[in-house]
Image (tube, grey):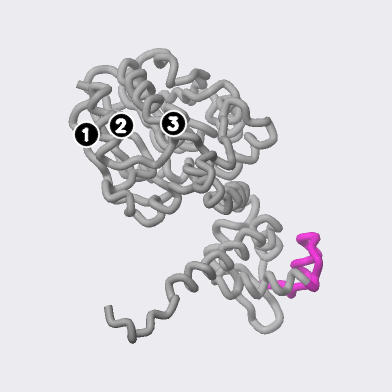
Amino acid sequence: MNKDVPVPPRTIEALAQAGYPSFALLAGMELDLFTPLKDGPLDASAVAKAAGTDPGKTVHLLHGLVAIGMMQFDGSRFSNSPEAQKYLVRGTTDYIGMRHHAYRRRWESMLRVGDTIRTGKPQRGMDYAAMSSEFRQSFYRGTFTECLVAGRELATRLDFSKNRRLVDVGGGSGGLSVAMAEAWPDLKITLVDLPSTAAVAERYIDEAGLKSRIRLAPADIVTGNLEGTYDVAIMRGLVPVLTPEQTQAALRNVYQGLEPGSRLYVVGWILDDTRSTPLSYATYNLLFVNDYENALIHTETEHRLWLGEAGFIDISRDRESRTYAADYMVARKA
């Protein structure tokens, strides 16, 4: 390389400034500044009064939200962008404003990655069984709609019309189960997760009016077999929070609970074998480095190896979707 050619720090500066728009969005979501604008434009004082915030400070955040495309300004009054109107107005069908719980938790965790790398010790020890009730509620309040949207995408792209008994393994808050029940009325669904987590799922399932369609089966899939047999299984977001040994045990237990010929969909966050792509997954992986002792986002080859060792055949990967980690590996019980 020619030493006389200047190399400006463009990438460094761009990455250093990339967080500011995200933090403006986070503040707007936490303060629920979009809901007061649901019926039309308001000036900054009216927004602040409705939101219970300081008028002098609020106006600067509103202009920041205009700058990132989440609001519009006509010279005197602010209004929601079409996207904010659809997704960030509390009480609407597509509302996802509660995700600020997840965003704050993830970003606060990412700020400690350097300490984790330096010491070799995760700075936030995530333990789903030992979570406090308050933290558990906040955790799943932030992730429920992500699971719901991922489930809805799967339900539209895949044909479950011939299936009768689906098991949602590690179903968390129940978002994926709710989506499947909405899309496939003849599908009987069982959600399997730890007892403390299943209690959270019960609330969301009840709110969706699907208590009669979705059965809860509290269990630890790592240490025990599934209760009953199923003709399709989905495991979303579980592999990255388990150790490789736990993943292998879980896959063996799921295999035993499936009828011959049945499919398992392992959904979400699959790295290419280079470990550097997709970009969002390669960098999001650092969250798992900081949150868990020995859990990560894994590669396609690792998924293939573990599925094959558990007895699955016809293993393939879907690359089409990146919506809320709705990409997947699919395999069939021999």
Q: Amino acid at mark 1?
A: Ile
What label does residue 238 carry, if any?
none
Query: Mark 1 Cα within 10 Å, few/some/many (few <14, many 20+)?
Result: some
Q: Which residues are magenta?
A: 41-56
Query: Mark 3 Cα within 10 Å, few/some/many (few <14, many 20+)?
Result: some
Q: Is residue 50 magenta?
A: yes
Q: CA distance from mark 3 to mark 2?
A: 31 Å
Left or right: 327 in relation to 37: left
Task: Identify which residue is drawn at 42% across, 30% down.
Answer: 243
The residue labelled by disc 3 is 242
Q: Are marks 3 and 2 in contact (CB under 8 Å)?
A: no
Give whichever of discs 3 and 2 has the lower sequence position.
2
Left or right: 40 in relation to 260: right
Give whichever of discs 1 and 3 has the lower sequence position.
3
What label does residue 315 carry, if any?
1
Tell us which disc is closer to us: 3 or 2.
Answer: 3
Q: Which corner quadrant of the image does residue 166 belong to? A: top left
Q: Which secondary structure class fits the magenta region best?
A: helix
Q: Quadrant of the C terminus?
A: top left
Vertical relation: 165 (above or below) 303 = above
Q: Amino acid at mark 2?
A: Ser
Query: Mark 2 Cα within 10 Å, few/some/many (few <14, many 20+)?
Result: few
Q: Amino acid at mark 3?
A: Leu
The residue labelled by disc 2 is 161
Task: Identify which residue is drawn at 52% across, 19% down.
Answer: 218
Q: CA distance from mark 2 to mark 1?
A: 21 Å
Give whichever of discs 2 and 1 has the lower sequence position.
2
Q: Residue 93: in sight, yes or no?
A: no
Q: Residue 86, position in %: x, y?
A: 55, 59
Q: Are marks 2 and 1 in contact (CB under 8 Å)?
A: no
Asked which secondary structure carries label 2, the reply is loop
